[in-house]
Image: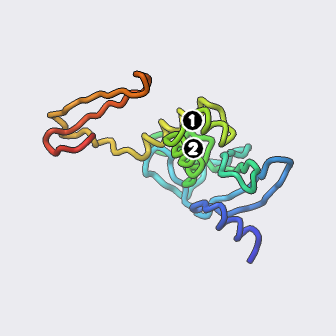
Amino acid sequence: MRASTLLNRLLCLPKATVRDVDIADDRVRVGVRPQRRRMQCPHCDYSTLHRYDTREVDSAWRHLDLGGRVCVLTMRRRRLRCPEHGVLVEAVDFARLGSGFTRDFEDLVVWLATKTDKTTAATFCRIVWRTVGAMCSRVAADKLDPDRFAGLVNIGVDKISWRKHHKYLTLVSDHETGTIV
């Protein structure tokens, strides 16, 4: 089995193929290329085979660490002309729009943020503290259903505190179904 195929399986990158690998002191730089020829607009469902051009610089995303080293994915992205949004770089399946991190890395950081405080999650993942909050916002916008409050009319609100009034929990319930919103 070729090393690039093995690394492709190890990284679990959807619709991307490993092009080259460069290992420097504490970093692993993995060059990837898209497997598909059709490009997707990052804002809508428009896709095309026709390339506007290719960017002159590589885009980079931080991925899960490999063997204790920071792993960075790089890719020379193509640009397309969307009829609705104009000229944009193509969307990639392994990262969210506007993020410098892969979905796997963001999901790990957000999971850690649910188990511990932001400072510990940031230190463990070797990122800046403010980045944890931005990741939480992106993942919540991606995962939560935007229609979860549709039809919500009768609600009940209850708030409790613990640890000498330093920790608070607010519960919102739907009186129609008896579930926690």
- Looking at the image, residue 161 sits to the left or right of residue 73; the answer is left
Q: Is residue 45 visible?
A: yes
Q: Which mark is residue 132?
A: 1
Depth check: 155 or 166 in front? 166
Q: Residues within 10 Å of mark 1 (few under 14, many from 20)?
A: many
Q: Which residue is mark 2?
A: 109
Return the x and y of residue 90 as percentages of the image width and height.
Answer: 57, 49
**50 vs 5: above or below:** above
Q: Amino acid at mark 2?
A: Val
Q: Give the quadrant of residue 20.
A: bottom right
Numbered disc 2: secondary structure: helix
- Looking at the image, residue 139 sits to the left or right of residue 162; the answer is right
Q: Is residue 81 visible?
A: no
Q: Amino acid at mark 1?
A: Val
Return the x and y of residue 180 as percentages of the image width and height.
Answer: 26, 41
Depth check: 131 or 77 in front? 131
Q: CA distance from mark 2 to mark 1?
A: 7 Å
Q: Residues within 10 Å of mark 2 (few under 14, many from 20)?
A: many
Depth check: 25 or 16 in front? 25
Whether pointer 2 and pointer 1 mark residues with C-beta atoms closer than 8 Å, the reply is yes
